[in-house]
Image: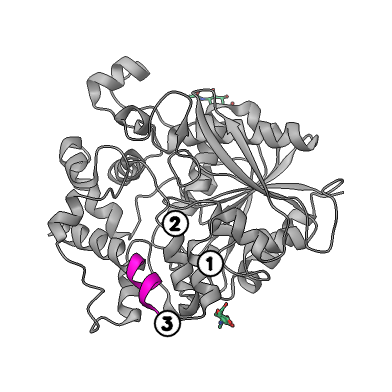
Amino acid sequence: MHLLYFILTIYFFRNVRADVVLDRTTDPSILEDASLDTFSLIRKYGFPCEIHRVYTEDKYILEMHRIPHGRDDVSAVGRPVVFLQHGLLSSSAEWVLMLPGKGLAYILAEAGYDVWMGNARGNTYSKHHVSLNPTSSSFWKFSWHEIGYYDLPAMIDYVIKETGVPKIHYIGFSQGTTAFWVMTSTRPEYNDKIVAMQALAPVAYVGNVRSPLIKAIAPFTNSMEILFKLLGRNEFLPNGKVNELAGQSYCVEEAITQVLCTNLLFLLCGFNVEQLNATMLPVVLGHTPAGASTRQVIHFGQLYNSNKFVQFDHGWLSNKRRYGTFKPPAYNLTAITTPVFLHYADNDWLSTPNDVDKLLKEVNSAVGKYRVPLAKFNHLDFVFAINAKELIYDRLLNIMKLFNK
Ligand SMILES: *[C@@H]1O[C@H](CO)[C@@H](O)[C@H](O)[C@H]1NC(C)=O
Ligand SMILES: *[C@@H]1O[C@H](CO)[C@@H](O)[C@H](O)[C@H]1NC(C)=O
């Protein structure tokens, strides 16, 4: 039953995307946004943008995007620096898909920040490695552990070197927070490189998630081979198996309304039609999913099963070899010393209030938690909601301002 639900979820998700983007007769400029990359999108709306390449210790090549200043400024000198890390299956585009005045990266740039956006290994912009080919399995042997352990430190060190500031602000969304907890607990020296951490929809403990996707995967995480067969051994949601199982597209049929497709898409993360601007949907779908490894998703499934925040479970024999213990070790959250602000919402299917509380209690440097004052606010609303600025970003900027001299 779970499995069927799961296959259908993925199947709709795959097909909604192309269909809405291609078939909707909507504003040509919006349609264009669906296909522009992050760099071109930012330039189109009159902001400066730079592309930077970063090498990780384990030789992945990551692409970062920078908005050095706002539209009316001329230089990045003297501006506080902020680093933004996207969520699962997403990319730097997440921060600029909504137009200027709405997208967080634009708002930060206009508010005086030098904005840097990361891209995790395996997504659209970071599918490169010095010697491994993304068509090979070796390339995809990572979860968000490696994103936190290798990618974030590499990108943060790069930003600090490039800008010459001693510390930078960090804003993470969803998996962008998970990777941050990994980094600051496994490499505590990175705590001192961050001014403050703003966690949008924080994810560490996931025992209470309501996401059908995670729940569907959870029963199979002990039989990795089954999951690999269904989801692909390497990249998550590959063309092929799942699509074959599902056959022809549903959403192409006219009877399926856009709203229904919207619901199915957001089944993955929870949905809230009221805060979703349907006009902008093609843009969101044109940039998501942006690529992730199957292991990233499996790792979340494992956390759901164990209700712990622990490293990847490779099976007890491999665990013993890698970690020295039969069970994967827990991340040491008490090692986190960066001031942490947790922004959460009641209706969030992935970052649930109970799980956020659990995290809050374990992070000694957590300053507080901030509830979004809207009952139906869900996971993706943190980056795409019509009223995200009024509901979250204004407060976020006020908190960040306290740290700038
Ligand atoms: C939805 O997006 C369109 C295109 O960007 C915009 O013109 C419209 O004002 C937005 N609607 C709301 C309710 O924000
Ligand atoms: C966790 O980190 C704290 C602070 O750095 C340290 O005192 C403690 O020994 C660590 N615990 C484990 C189990 O490594």
Amino acid carrying label 3: it is Thr
**Residue 114 shows in this picture:** yes
Give residue 33's mark.
Answer: 1
Q: Is residue 383 above or below residue 316?
A: below
Q: Main secondary structure of the magenta part?
A: helix
Tally of marks: 3
* Residue 304 falls inside the magenta stretch: no
For image coordinates 64% across by 62% down, the residue present is: 104
Whole-percent x, y for residue 300 in the image: 35, 44
Q: Distance between the residues labelled 3 and 2?
A: 35 Å
Residue closer to the observer: 96 or 131: 131
For image coordinates 30% across by 52% down, the residue present is: 214
Q: Name the residue under label 3.
A: 25
Q: In which quarter of the image is residue 295?
A: top left
Q: Distance between the residues labelled 1 and 2?
A: 29 Å
* Residue 18 falls inside the magenta stretch: yes
For image coordinates 47% across by 64% down, the residue present is: 380
Whole-percent x, y for residue 159 in the image: 70, 37
**Would residue 190 be found to the left or right of residue 262 on screen?**
right
Which callout, 1 or 2, points at the residue further toward the start of the chain? 1
For image coordinates 53% across by 44% down, the residue present is: 119
Amino acid carrying label 2: it is Ser
Q: In which quarter of the image is residue 99?
A: bottom right
Q: Is mark 1 on a helix, strand or loop?
A: helix
Q: Do the residues labelled 3 and 2 touch (CB within 8 Å)?
A: no
Q: Distance between the residues labelled 3 and 1?
A: 14 Å
Mark 1 burial class by Cα count in 10 Å: few <14, some 14-19, many 20+ = many
**Would residue 233 be found to the left or right of residue 246 on screen?**
right
Amino acid carrying label 1: it is Asp
Q: Mark 2 points at which residue?
A: 351
User: Magenta span covers which residues?
Assistant: 17-24
